[in-house]
Image (cartoon, helix red, strand yellow):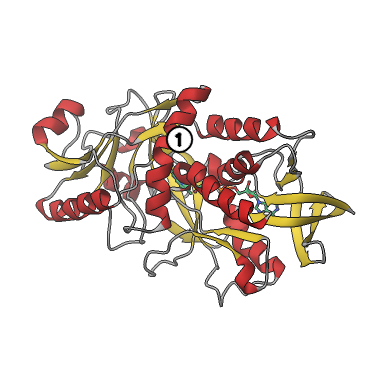
């Protein structure tokens, strides 16, 4: 049976970023992916926002890795020709009662280490974006957008530099993992073919299925609270000339699903404008846009009153791998070496929802340190 040093399960932004970070000439690494190429999961179905990190509780992994990841993504883009735009973001209050929420967010953002946030008033808002209706806003100049595929292409190229063979093995689904003398035996399925390989170290970056992969090795995912809940978000594109260039977010809808930022503007690198994503829990993976258009539009018009419902067209959707169910409070990313559970050399990354794209290079650094300690 073939043996390699490290197997990464899942070739999304996170698995690829980790691969690019831990690749060495003397390490044999495979990255196993069930789809036909990398980046076909959540990493290609998101808002492509380089977040600043103000929504997440102080000292959480989400906050720390996002604040660290933000400048890392910008410098990767700058130095390696990955498309990005530092377009800035406004989180707007359209009613008096929302202003308290903005103050809380501003304070949290500052506690998280974001230095350049400020509250701006109507005049400044209009000088940035004349069509936006708001009485005040948090202005975040370090928020931007990135070409997520370009970023993944960079991680993949960097990982390949250190490898004699292509480290990416597509069309290969991990279906079982056993503890063995050498470390782990990974069983995979590719079409009707079954294949096994041995490895010393496993990195589970399987996104929406990371809980199932953790279960394969024998971790009780309910006892450990690793079970993922799928939370879908739809996007609608706007027909016609975009009325704004910036990222405009409403005050976060606190009473609804925890961690949802609200339907916001989603400008892309090509200059098109979408709106989204909303949030609703689902029990199957189906990317068909199925939201009620009227309800979706009503989330937009408080801050962009001139958007016409008939100009919104269903675009795409993405699904969040959330650790908290609909009524449950905030849950942080799980990134851990499972040695204490009896699985030395097994690293789990579970619940890597937003801002996982922004965090990817910082997550990779964190996992790289764990790997260096193990090997
Ligand atoms: C609607 C939405 C909007 C978002 N917006 C943003 C944003 O603006 N900014 C931001 O920073 N983050 C955002 N995110 C979060 C971000 O997209 C994710 O955190 C990030 O893409 C996760 O990457 P990943 O590699 O962990 O997962 P994925 O991209 O899902 O990759 C996991 C891979 O594992 C593979 N896999 C699964 N099971 C197996 C198996 N058994 N065997 C082999 N392969 C397997 C899958 O096919 C997949 O390719 C958003 C997410 C969503 C859903």
Asked if one can make out residue 205 in the rendered structure from this viewpoint, the answer is: no
- Asked whether 15 or 328 is in front, the reply is 15
Q: Is residue 163 left or right of residue 327?
A: right
Element under label 1? helix
Q: Residue at x 49, y 24 (%)?
A: 79
Q: Residue at x 62, y 38 (%)?
A: 20
| Above or below, 343 relative to 174 | below
Q: Residue at x 76, y 35 (%)?
A: 166
Quadrant where the C terminus is found in the figure: bottom right
- Residue 296 in the image: state x and y as whole percent: 34, 47
Disc 1, ligand 1: is the CB inside 8 Å?
no
Q: Is residue 232 left or right of residue 275?
A: right
Q: Residue at x 45, y 42 (%)?
A: 358
Q: Which residue is mark 1?
A: 73
- Residue 13 in the image: state x and y as whole percent: 56, 42
Q: Residue furthest bottom?
A: 223
| Number of numbered discs overlaid on the protein picture | 1
- Asked whether 296 or 108 is in front, the reply is 108
Quadrant where the N terminus is found in the figure: bottom right
| Above or below, 306 relative to 322 | above
Q: Is residue 112 left or right of residue 12?
A: left
- Residue 133 in the image: state x and y as whole percent: 16, 38
- Asked whether 345 or 147 is in front, the reply is 345
């Amino acid at each position: 049976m073939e043996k390699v040093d490290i197997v990464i399960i899942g070739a999304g932004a996170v698995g690829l970023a980790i691969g690019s970070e831990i690749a060495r000439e003397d390490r044999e690494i495979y990255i196993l992916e069930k789809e036909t190429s990398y980046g076909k999961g959540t990493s290609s179905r998101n808002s492509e926002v380089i977040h600043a990190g103000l929504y997440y509780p102080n000292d959480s992994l989400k906050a720390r890795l996002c604040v660290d990841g933000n400048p890392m993504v910008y410098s990767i883009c700058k130095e390696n020709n990955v498309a990005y735009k530092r377009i800035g973001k406004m989180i707007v209050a359209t009613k008096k009662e929302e202003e308290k929420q903005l103050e809380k967010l501003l304070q949290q953002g500052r506690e998280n280490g974001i230095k350049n946030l400020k509250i701006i008033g109507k005049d400044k808002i209009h000088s940035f974006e004349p069509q936006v209706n708001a009485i005040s806003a948090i202005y975040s100049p370090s928020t931007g957008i990135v070409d997520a595929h370009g970023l993944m292409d960079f991680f993949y190229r960097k990982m390949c530099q250190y490898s004699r063979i292509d480290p990416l093995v597509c069309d290969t689904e991990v279906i079982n993992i056993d503890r063995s003398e050498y470390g782990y035996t990974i069983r995979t399925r590719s079409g009707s073919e079954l294949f096994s390989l041995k490895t010393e170290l496993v990195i589970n970056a399987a996104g929406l299925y990371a809980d199932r992969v953790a279960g394969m090795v024998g971790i009780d995912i309910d006892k450990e609270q690793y079970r993922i809940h799928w939370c879908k978000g739809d996007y609608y594109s706007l027909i016609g000339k975009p009325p704004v260039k910036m990222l405009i977010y409403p005050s976060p809808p606190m009473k609804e699903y925890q961690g949802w930022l609200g339907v916001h503007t989603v400008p892309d690198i090509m200059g098109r404008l979408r709106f989204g994503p909303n949030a609703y829990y689902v029990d199957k993976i189906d990317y068909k846009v199925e939201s009620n258009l009227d309800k979706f539009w009503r989330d937009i018009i408080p801050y962009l009153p001139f958007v016409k419902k008939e100009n919104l067209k269903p675009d795409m959707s993405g699904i969040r791998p959330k650790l908290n169910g609909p009524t449950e409070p905030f849950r942080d990313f799980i990134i851990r070496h499972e040695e204490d559970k009896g699985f030395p050399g097994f690293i789990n990354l579970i619940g890597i929802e937003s801002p996982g794209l922004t965090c990817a290079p910082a997550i990779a650094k964190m996992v790289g340190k764990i790997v260096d300690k193990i090997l």
